[in-house]
Image (cartoon, coloured by chain):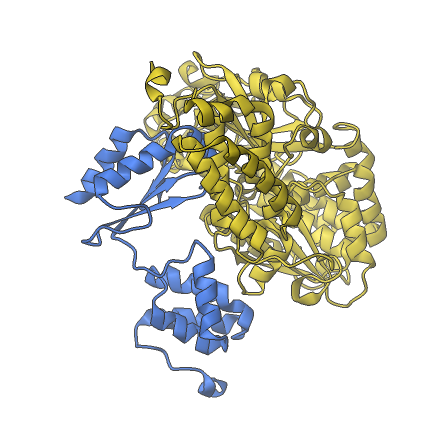
Chain colours: A yellow, B blue
């Protein structure tokens, strides 16, 4: 593949699209697909054929506003149609000039769309994820070609460092630094791994990226492999995401066909290939050393670090592990430059972040916002606030490793440091809004049950500690707790977080600690008055609550 | 198949064993193919039967204890035969906040079994999941592979009743 050949593919694809400029794009990512958008696509195709309308029907990735799905966008103009059913096909095709009937219109002028900045999701909902040509036509694989032919690995690492990109899996380790460490470690065999084991409940960003724009992740991985000197890669993806796996398989096959994977990529000396490894549904496998154990075919239990995977990882070889979203940022960073990327975001957290916004909020879906945006903007402007008749209580970020952030911190800029300061973490991007119908003790119990079940059992603080904490929280929600239990719970939080082997145990107390910090009165109500103000727990005097 | 003399014979002439064997061969019968192979077994047979674990362990030269350890460590693997129908209740945070627990209780009540069990007649298996990533349509359930969102208790009971006939 040369630059000319790549341009030729892009040109031909663009010409083909210009021949029939009118397009109906049907979202066929998981959210809309589960509302039978595939049937809508077929109905539209049949209708176009029946009426010989000059229009192409395409299947594309996620358009973001999942709660109004199934979504169809009409080009040119990008007019969005919401809540479409297969019965609407006739009316849509008959009204192509007006881009479909008025009653299905969904305005793009609303804050949900206007407040977003799309880098990772720039092609999402625009390209057909199962066609490499469309990714190429959108500028795809240009960055890779340029890197291989014009840049040294060291220059690429430098560019990524300059961008200020930090790991999007949650911990926020500087990506450039990680790449640099792997690059500097000697050895003929090195590996690149993409962590797509999105295990946090309430998070669906990685799945959406893989389903909507898989080539972006592949391109990022291939560039990473070149930069650190790896020859082999793995994408570790959850078995629970069959559609993402299917599209990855297609993407890898097409990338091989065009010579972006394999030997002598783009006529250079660089060779790299990758394969998919399917996870088994263990939350702990999001931890890098556990993930490596799983790829090696073993139980996914973590091991102490150091040595870090950068020095000794998969089969004891230097290994680079990054999250899906981290890789997805790479092509754009190299195409537009690290400095350009670093201009977005806040002082210490650059660029954008994808969040899966869900829970008690009007607009549920996938959003990408610049770092430094406030939680209030996300929840109330983009999300449209909590449903009527309820009041906002907290927003939960970081899943079972994160915490609940109350109203008083809604004006906090979203970045790694400030979220940590208030007792939560950035996490991978799940953001669940809770209103007054949520009981915070119950929420803490919910997450502790999760950590207890997902503890791999290797180290005692986590294995036994989470079970004890769960037991204490259960007593509180059942109304059988005594005041001493609260003290014990706090002691255990401290013990488990400071002595556990890996991140799962170290962060397991976070949901308890953050709810204790901001909603302590709910705990004391459960223990002393045996009362649950949200009416969720059956802890005794529930009659006065439900009244 | 000359070098396979040390490998165990296929447990039966069931065609599915050849699919399982194919996965192992594609990975050169390497030990690290254990999880990949177990995925193929579960895809082909619906669950991990003891003879299957034994066959895979012997073929890949891993101790049976390790194969069993891996099979029980990962939630995705099941050692019990599946029901004719499967109802999966998502207990992810978004679904939980929207009342997934009550849905699970309703399903348990309707089927008279607990989550993780299969009805006595083998008709319906009730399972819960951590998060199926369909948070945008919470609470969500999966009926025989089809994800359905915004589920209500009455709709859930109606769907389960349909399977009972």
User: In x, y percent, where is residue B146?
Assistant: 34, 42
Residue occupying image coordinates x 52% and y 25%: A433
The image quadrant where one finds the C terminus of chain A is top left
- Residue sitting at the far left: B165
The answer to which image quadrant residue A228 occupies is bottom right
User: In x, y percent, where is residue A199?
Assistant: 53, 45
Does residue A91 sit above or below A162 in this rendering? above
Q: Which of B162 and A281 is in front in this view?
A: A281
User: In x, y percent, where is residue B47?
Assistant: 35, 61
Side of A273 where A443 appears, left or right: left
Residue occupying image coordinates x 36% and y 63%: B44
Does residue B5 sit above or below A172 in this rendering? below
Does residue B16 sit above or below A381 in this rendering? below
Side of B61 where B112 appears, left or right: left
Residue occupying image coordinates x 72% and y 44%: A142
Side of B13 where A122 appears, left or right: right
The image quadrant where one finds the N terminus of chain A is bottom right
- Residue sitting at the far top: A389
The answer to which image quadrant residue A181 occupies is bottom right
Q: Nearer the viewer, residue A308 or A514?
A: A514
Q: Which of B78 and B149 is in front in this view?
A: B78
Q: Confirm whether residue A389 shows in the render.
A: yes
User: In x, y percent, where is residue B82?
Assistant: 30, 55
How many numbered markers are drawn?
Answer: 0
Side of A223 where B165 appears, left or right: left
Q: Confirm whether residue A29 shows in the render.
A: no
The answer to which image quadrant residue A38 occupies is top left
Q: Which of B47 and A125 is in front in this view?
A: B47
Residue occupying image coordinates x 44% and y 12%: A388
């Amino acid at each position: 593949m040369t630059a000319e050949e790549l341009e030729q593919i892009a040109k031909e694809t663009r010409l083909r699209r210009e021949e029939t400029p009118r397009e109906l794009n049907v979202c066929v990512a998981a959210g809309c697909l589960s509302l039978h958008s595939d049937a809508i696509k077929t109905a539209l195709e049949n209708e176009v054929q029946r009426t010989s309308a000059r229009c192409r029907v395409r299947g594309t990735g996620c358009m973001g506003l999942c709660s109004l799905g199934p979504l169809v966008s009409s080009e040119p103009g990008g007019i969005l149609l919401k809540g479409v059913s297969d019965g609407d096909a006739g009316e849509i095709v008959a009204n192509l000039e007006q881009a479909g009937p008025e009653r299905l219109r969904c305005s793009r002028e609303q804050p949900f769309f206007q407040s977003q900045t799309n880098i990772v999701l720039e092609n999402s909902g625009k390209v057909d994820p199962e066609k490499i040509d469309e990714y190429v036509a959108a500028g795809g694989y240009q960055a890779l070609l340029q890197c291989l032919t014009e840049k040294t690995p060291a220059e690429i690492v430098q560019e990524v460092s300059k961008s200020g990109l930090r790991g999007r899996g949650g911990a926020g380790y500087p990506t450039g630094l990680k790449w640099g460490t792997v690059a500097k470690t000697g050895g003929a065999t090195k590996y690149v791994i993409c962590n797509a084991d999105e295990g946090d409940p309430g998070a669906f960003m990685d799945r959406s990226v893989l389903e909507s724009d898989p080539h972006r992740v592949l391109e990022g991985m291939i560039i990473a492999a070149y930069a650190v000197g790896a020859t082999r890669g793995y994408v570790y993806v959850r078995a629970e995401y069959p559609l993402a796996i299917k599209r990855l398989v297609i993407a890898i096959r097409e990338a091989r066909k065009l010579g972006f994977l394999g030997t002598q990529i783009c006529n250079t000396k660089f060779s790299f290939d990758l394969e998919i490894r399917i996870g088994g549904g263990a939350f702990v496998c999001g931890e890098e050393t556990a993930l490596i154990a799983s790829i090696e075919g073993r139980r996914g239990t973590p091991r102490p670090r150091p040595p870090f995977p950068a020095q000794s990882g998969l089969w004891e070889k230097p290994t680079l592990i990054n999250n899906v979203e981290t890789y997805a940022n790479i092509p754009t960073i190299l195409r537009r430059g690290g400095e350009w990327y670093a201009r977005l975001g806040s002082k210490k957290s650059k660029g954008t972040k994808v969040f899966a916004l869900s829970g008690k909020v009007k607009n549920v879906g996938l959003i990408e916002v610049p770092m430094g945006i406030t939680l209030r903007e996300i929840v109330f402007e983009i999300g449209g606030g909590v449903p009527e008749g309820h009041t906002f209580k907290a927003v939960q970020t970081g899943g079972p490793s994160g915490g609940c952030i109350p109203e008083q911190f809604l004006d906090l800029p979203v970045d790694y440091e400030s979220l940590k300061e208030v007792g939560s973490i950035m996490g991978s991007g799940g953001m669940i809004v809770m209103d007054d119908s949520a009981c915070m003790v119950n929420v803490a119990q919910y997450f502790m049950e999760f950590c207890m079940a997902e503890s791999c059992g290797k180290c005692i603080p986590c294995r036994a500690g989470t079970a004890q904490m769960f037991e204490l929280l259960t007593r509180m929600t059942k109304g059988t707790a005594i005041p001493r239990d609260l003290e014990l719970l706090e002691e255990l939080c401290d013990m488990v977080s400071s002595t556990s082997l890996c991140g799962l145990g170290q962060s397991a107390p976070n949901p308890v600690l953050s709810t204790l910090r901001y909603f302590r009165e709910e705990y004391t109500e459960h223990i002393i008055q045996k009362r649950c103000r949200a009416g969720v727990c059956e802890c005794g005097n529930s009659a006065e609550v439900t009244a | 198949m000359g070098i396979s003399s040390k490998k165990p014979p296929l447990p039966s002439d069931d065609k599915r064993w050849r699919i399982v064997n194919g996965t192992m061969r594609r990975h050169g019968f390497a030990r690290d193919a254990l999880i990949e192979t177990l995925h193929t077994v579960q895809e082909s047979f619906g669950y991990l039967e003891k003879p299957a674990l034994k066959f895979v362990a012997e073929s890949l030269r891993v101790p049976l204890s390790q194969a069993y350890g891996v099979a029980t460590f990962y939630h995705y693997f099941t050692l019990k035969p599946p029901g004719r129908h499967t109802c999966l209740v998502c207990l992810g945070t978004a679904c939980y906040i929207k009342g997934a627990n009550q849905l699970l209780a309703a399903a348990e009540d309707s089927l008279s079994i607990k989550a993780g069990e299969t009805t006595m007649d083998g008709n319906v298996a009730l399972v819960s999941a951590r998060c199926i990533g369909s948070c945008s349509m919470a609470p969500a359930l999966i009926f025989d592979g089809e994800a359905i969102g915004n589920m209500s208790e009455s709709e859930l009971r109606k769907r389960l009743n349909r399977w009972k006939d």
